[in-house]
Image (spheres, rainbow, N blue to C red):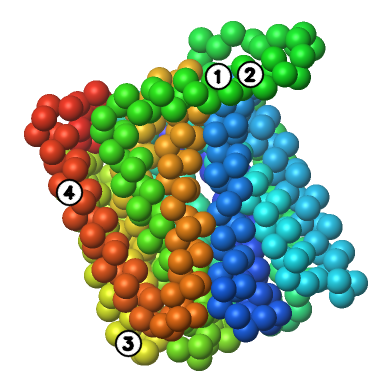
Amino acid sequence: MASNSPFRRLLVATGASSFGDGIRWVVMPLMATQLTSDPRLITGVFVVDRLPWLLFLLPGGALADRYDRLRLRVALDAFRAVVGAAFVVLAATGHVGLASVYLVTLLMASADAFVDSSSMALVPALVDDDDLERAGGHMEATEIVSRDLAGPAIGGVLFTIGLVVPLAVDALSFAVSAAVAVTIRGSFRAASLERADSGVGSTAKAARDLARSIREGMVWLWRQRTLRSLACLSTGMGLVTMMFMSVLVIFATDDLGLDARGYGLLMVPAAIGATLGSWVAPRLRRLPLATAVGGAVIVTGCAGILISRTSTVPIVAVLLALDAAGVFVWNVLTIAFRQRTIPDEMLGRVSAGYRFLLSLGMPVGALIGGILASAVGARATLGLVGVATCIVGTAAIGVLGARAADGDRPAASTVPA
């Protein structure tokens, strides 16, 4: 895989776009804190960021199985560059308000939902089956370093200079991603895919075909017991993760007294922990899936509980690293399991169906987080989130362990060695 030039280019494109995501994920909530003091409106940025995943993941997955996955990604990165540039103009002319923050977040997240489906389906076409965990680890590590480490840290610093600067860098990152991805040569349509009729048939027929593809993917997913269990557990995982993330910015600015730069820098240890989790995860592949992912989630939950009980920033930083490490162990192992289990001709739509179930909990989690933070405060909310996360991890051990005991091994109930 070291000499795999197309995969390296995908990593570079992923790093560029993820860097833009990291800047946006810090800048948008910080902008909201300057426009309102209502925790519900601040966490509304996270709700808006997650809602498009419910709307566009499933059609995005179906399209990824019908059209060239790389071209879809390039087009969507170019779209995000244009949207970002338009937001720069709004900021430069002093026309940014909470409504525009919500709108741009909505458009960016919508494109991101489509890109996620096509990009995940690209990886098995670029690397050998035995390299899926390593490739997944590299993809996760690239996203972590750019989106969770460099993006937030640099975005927080640039935010103190002026609003236009981080927004311009954000827009540029997607332009760079599109420019790099377009240099990857080859066809990246799904295996055994018959080319859809070009210019033949009505829009209604095209819509029916798309709906049928989505339904086929969901039915296939639901019939796979281990994948179905993982998807349902991921719904709970998405809910508690977004509760945590949506309240963290309020906890950092109100309880810890951090400014924009401090909040951005606080994301650095979390990114380091996530990188560590991505490095550790492939080394856990020989463990039962239930033990590896369930244990990792319990570690995340315990870290969240401890965060809620301290106001010492260095301790919070260490615990955030531990929290993120557990999340990314879950991510790497479950993604590799899905990529190995799902047939290539269905990889886009089944993966999208899985992510759709995961995403069901995310906007709900952000909404609940805002309501709880408004009622009992950010610190108490983080403690409750930690307890809930431990419950999800315990459920993962029980449910996936039972699947293994029943002999439910469609592609093995552990991540194969």
Element assignment for label 1: helix
Asked if the residues shown at circle 2 and circle 4 are in contact, with their CB atoms under 8 angstroms apart, the answer is no
Asked if the residues shown at circle 1 and circle 3 are in contact, with their CB atoms under 8 angstroms apart, the answer is no
Q: Give the CA distance from mark 2 to mark 4.
A: 39 Å
In the rendered image, which residue does mark 3 sit on? 310
Residue 334 at x, y = what percent? 33, 41
Q: What residue type is labelled 2?
A: Arg
Element assignment for label 4: helix
Residue 26 at x, y = what percent? 59, 69
Name the foreground residue: 215 vs 342.
215
Q: Residue at x 49, y 35 (%)?
A: 352
Residue 81 at x, y = what percent? 76, 50
For disc 4, the neighbor class at 10 Å (few under 14, some 14 to 19, many from 20) is many
Q: Is residue 161 visible?
A: yes
Residue 397: numbered disc: 4
Vertical placement of 311 versus 32: above or below? below
